[in-house]
Image: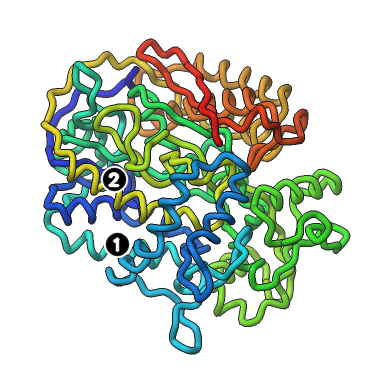
Amino acid sequence: MKLLTGKPGWTVQADVIVIGSGVAGLTTALNLRASKLSVLLVTKAKIDEGSTKWAQGGIAAALGPGDTPDQHKKDTLTAGAGLCDIAAVDVLVTEGPEAVRKLIAQGAVFDKSETGEIALTREGGHLRNRILHAGGDATGAEVSRALLAAVNDDEGIEVIENALAIDVLQSAAGAVCGVTLHVINAGSRDGVGRALAKAVVIATGGLGQVYSQTTNPPVSTGDGVALALRAGAEVADVEFIQFHPTVLWRESASGGQQPLISEAVRGEGALLLNDKGERFMKEKHPLAELAPRDIVAKEIFIQMKESNSPHVWLDATTVPDFEKRFPTIYASCLENGIDPKSQAIPVAPASHYASGGVRVDLNGQTTVPGLYACGETACTGAHGANRLASNSLLEGLVFGARIAAHIAAHPAPQLEPEDAPAHFLLNPAIQLPLQLAMSQGAGVMRSAASLKETLGILEQLATRTSTEPCIEAWEATNLYLLAIAIIRGAAERKESRGSHWRSDFPEPSLDWQRRIIQRIDSDGVWHMRYEEVK
């Protein structure tokens, strides 16, 4: 099952192809180079335009006095609501501190306290201060800067920008041996080409654009997850989409990426208020405004519904030195006519992070030989039903290093790709109605009725096929596959757990303490199985 493309006009080759230039992709590439493997780094836009640079929160790691990996593990398991893979969490929290130290050694500069030590703050779901920040609210940008500097200095990493990975190339036995790329305006490598390699690592980030309101950049159309699905790989936990509770609400915004108001603002004392000016989180959770994101997002949604308002309010007027602590957020607010030092900020939930993705083992291997996945594209199981704040950058650092080590320790031959028929492509015009339907029926709150209605809309959209390959058509087709997977998982999971909220099944159920795993066979037929979680 492949996307319709033009005929490849060029070929390039490397030991390993890494698709994506966020923290996961860059970390993997640099660690591969440490083993002297040549790397082709493919990125959809410019190399610094992925989701990593937008990360305002920080990196969670047990580095502070009195903190331990075991305490970090407990907080992660609590947020994951019974669906975390214990082994994956152990890897994340025990290897995390050293991964952060290595990042600092590579040149990343984090905020320091008055005593000169790294300043550690707290975010929702953490019972200790263990979040490293850079530039106040620009952690992702600093991490990206440090890793990119190292990549740019390495001649063994060839970078291809403005390139969409369309499908993997596979041998007669199904093993991955490269990818089909479409490159925009790249001279001799313009248009469709083939990139050959002994292993392929997908690190394409999230799928936030499947919804009409998201914190994700425009490039986050879930291309990597869709590519893996078409190759026959399994995906898991895709129904668990984390909605960030506090995204700047703008009356004029019809869709696309919205400015995020970091959880760290609440960590510094900002309070959530309803239309009556009342705090509403205080009575709902012991951590109040710093409760796990799914709980905060649900309560905001309830308040919005009860008041028939498109947003609630975040009062940050008591946060000291707001403009210095959160310069990026402060600028975003001012651009939208709000002074957070004297006015409450209108906020609402928006899709933020996919806890699920391509199912991988502890070395990032998918169920397709030669294909690896890392970062938000992957489902290691570490996040369970809901990601703990600031564990995402850490996951990219930890598992990127593990993938590189596994590839280096298990050298594979370069296989010959088999020609596969390509015939699947949808009309680009389906993207906006798909996004609106997903936000309406498969967003923060879901039910059997809303999911059935949304599925019906998607099935109608799927009749609008295309015979004209282009970036917009490939993206729309990818979003369609992801939307179907999300709805199938959400409809099957008849409970509320983590970031998945069913109004018709409002409580968690022990019967559903299991992972839903899906795949598509070569005939385009969907399959589903379960994996018990202890």
What is the number of the mark on residue 147?
A: 1
Q: Earlier in the sequence, mark 2 or mark 1?
A: 1
The residue tagged with tag 1: helix, strand or loop? Answer: helix
The part of the image, by quadrant, that contains residue 268 is bottom right
Look at mark 2 in the image and give the residue it sits on: 403
User: How has the structure been colored for display?
Assistant: rainbow
Q: Residue at x 36, y 44 (%)?
A: 374
Label 2 sits on a secondary structure element that is helix
Look at the image and tell me in which quarter the N terminus lies.
top left
Q: Which of the two residues, 232 or 409, is positioned nearer the viewer here?
A: 409
Looking at the image, residue 488 sits to the left or right of residue 219; the answer is right
Q: Amino acid at mark 2?
A: Ile
Answer yes or no: is residue 465 visible.
yes
Q: Is residue 80 left or right of residue 311?
A: left
Compared to 446, does 119 lie above or below? below
Which residue: 45% across, 30% down?
A: 235
Which residue is at 61% across, 46% downward?
A: 243
x%, y% of residue 442? 64, 32
Label placed on residue 169: none
Q: Is residue 92 above or below residue 126?
A: above
Q: In the depicted view, which residue is nearer to us: 154 or 87?
A: 87
How many residues crowd around disc 1 within 10 Å: few (fewer than 14), some, or many (20 or more)? many
Quarter of the image where the C terminus is located:
top right
Which residue lies at the image location 76% right of the left edge and 35% below the top edge? 506
Q: Is residue 208 visible?
A: no
Q: Are marks 2 and 1 in contact (CB under 8 Å)?
A: no
Q: Position of residue 38 (x, y in %)?
A: 13, 47
Q: Which quadrant holds residue 488?
A: top right
The amino acid beneath tag 1 is Leu
